[in-house]
Amino acid sequence: MLNIGSYDERIKNFDWNIAEKELDYHPGDIINIGWYCSDRICLMGKADKPGLLWEGSTGVEKRYTYNDIRLNSNTIAQFLLDLGIKPEDRVCLFMDKIPELYIGFLGILKMGAIAQPLFSAFGDDSLFIRLDNAQTTAIITQKKHLPKVRKIIDKMPYMKHIIIVDADPGKPLANREVAFDMAKAEKIETFDFHPTTAESPSVLHYTSGTTGQPKGVKHVHYSLISQYLTSKWVLDLRDDDIYWCTADPGWVTGTSYGIIGAFSNGVTQCVLDAGFSADNWYRFIEKYRISMWYSAPTAIRSLMKAGEEVIKKYDLSSLRHLASVGEPLNPEAVIWSERVFGKPFLDTYWQTETGSIMISNYPGMKIKPGSMGKPFPGITATVIHPETFEPFNESGKIGLIAIKPGWPAMMRTYWKNEETYQKKFQNGWYLPGDRSSIDNEGYFWFVGRDDDVINTGGHLVSPFEVESALLEHPAVAESAVVAKPDFVNMEVVKAFVTLKPGFTASKDLDLEIMNFVRKKLSPLAMPQEIEFIDSLPKTRSGKIMRRILHAKEWGEEIGDTSTLEND
Ligand code: WT7
């Protein structure tokens, strides 16, 4: 029996109070995600059930029952409180996928602060921009990431505490640094969690746009309602599942479904904190008997590339249900997974701002490979005309995806940027910024983004951020950054660069600039290719026309160039 039962039945008379009732939540009540993801599961009789099974890159394992998760998150919450951190202060999690990240997230929420997870591969520039925007009070990190934090600490007077989870005992710490050892800390049996209510802020995730700095997407504790129910109905999480969400909690999939959805449903989830290799992933599935696997198209395409011989070495018969998110899932990947694993990856579509799955393929529903599926029950989604903002009357037309606001996990604003937030709405619709069509059976077919943001392996990269970093290199005069096609990552970053007088293009300079961006921003944002050119195409008003460079990379029509400077 599927959790969703039948999709067609569920969309009739849907009400979010289905989830509220299951969670025993009544409007106006206290609702705290940290409590729901640990204490409540223990109260339901699952205190001794494994909640988190963790394996590190050296093969070392750690296991936490729901009671361990409860006690450790209490302990972290109390530690933060004792430091003087206050409700709604921003506390950044800047760590690899170690247990402290997952449990620390719940601890932050328990004491009422706002969790700000940031991808641990971020360089000091990427880190600083986001911490500065949020005026973050504390950062929890590992000693391996400390040099990046120390490099920018003098620019952050608001940052009061750098909490190191693996500090060497006896080694002196710098000003503002403090050690916290989760394993050794005396466990706090009961913690009076902060009485957060539906609209209390919970998580601040940063996402990149075409222009301007990255935006802080503010979520609230009520998001639990959507995250819990979509995990149950789309990911079909059940009591006996062993669940593996491959996403890093530096990104929204890793929190909405890698923490909140999984733990609020009381399932056992596994985390592999190691780099990708087909062998290692299949070994992990076999070892832990993974039954539900939520991953991303880039990973699936990498597995396809690794071939089928390697699959035969492992027993993957535990797999029951597979889903994917982050970028277009090619029909070939769906068909391939059905053939080699006996189950197709079901595509799900959503974004940092929506907080939970919006459009998806559902267990039990007819799958059309290449389609993102249909709106989740309770979600009204359509495709609208890009100028009139009116829905089309006929199927098959390409327009903007539009969603009626009001589901529980919808962002509440962009941090200190209400103006940009308001621009995401037109004619009563929320516009995620993507283009799609809908077929005559109501299935959505993704077409592309409606902006210049690069989606590399499911991670959004702002061309503006990369261009800004490039300009800081002494040799670079001007730059334009666009997506370039790639089999595995779908898109990778490509930079067009003009050099300052006195510099000449060379392989060494090429590598030096790439490395420069990698260190400042992240490996994802690093251009995979740099093309040195004499001049960039510009409008008469001097704006660089990325569109033309993009079209060239993709072999597309260049389109209207009437505003071009040197035509
Ligand atoms: C953007 C959101 C939601 C978790 C990961 C990404 C693209 C997302 C799909 C899909 C085609 C997709 C969209 C979206 N995207 N899922 N199934 N098919 N495109 O979150 O970093 O906020 O990125 O990723 O362009 O707007 P994000």
Image: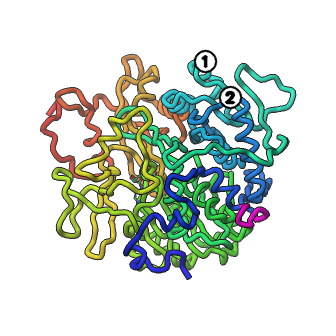
Here the colouring is: rainbow
Mark-to-mark CA distance, 2 and 1: 21 Å
Which residue range is magenta in the image?
42-49
Residue type for callout 1:
Asp
Q: Nearer the viewer, residue 534 or 403?
A: 403
Q: Nearer the viewer, residue 5 or 314?
A: 5
Labels 2, 1: front one: 2
Q: Nearer the viewer, residue 381 or 455?
A: 381
Q: Residue at x 65, y 41 (%)?
A: 111
Ligand 1 lies under 8 Å from the Cβ of mark 2? no
Q: Check disc 1 and report its element: helix, strand or loop.
A: helix
Main SS of residues in magenta: helix
Q: Which mark is residue 84?
A: 2
Relative to 563, residue 269 above or below: below
How far across and down, in percent of the image, does residue 233 sit?
51, 70
Q: Is the N terminus in the top left, top right, bottom left or bottom right quadrant?
A: bottom right
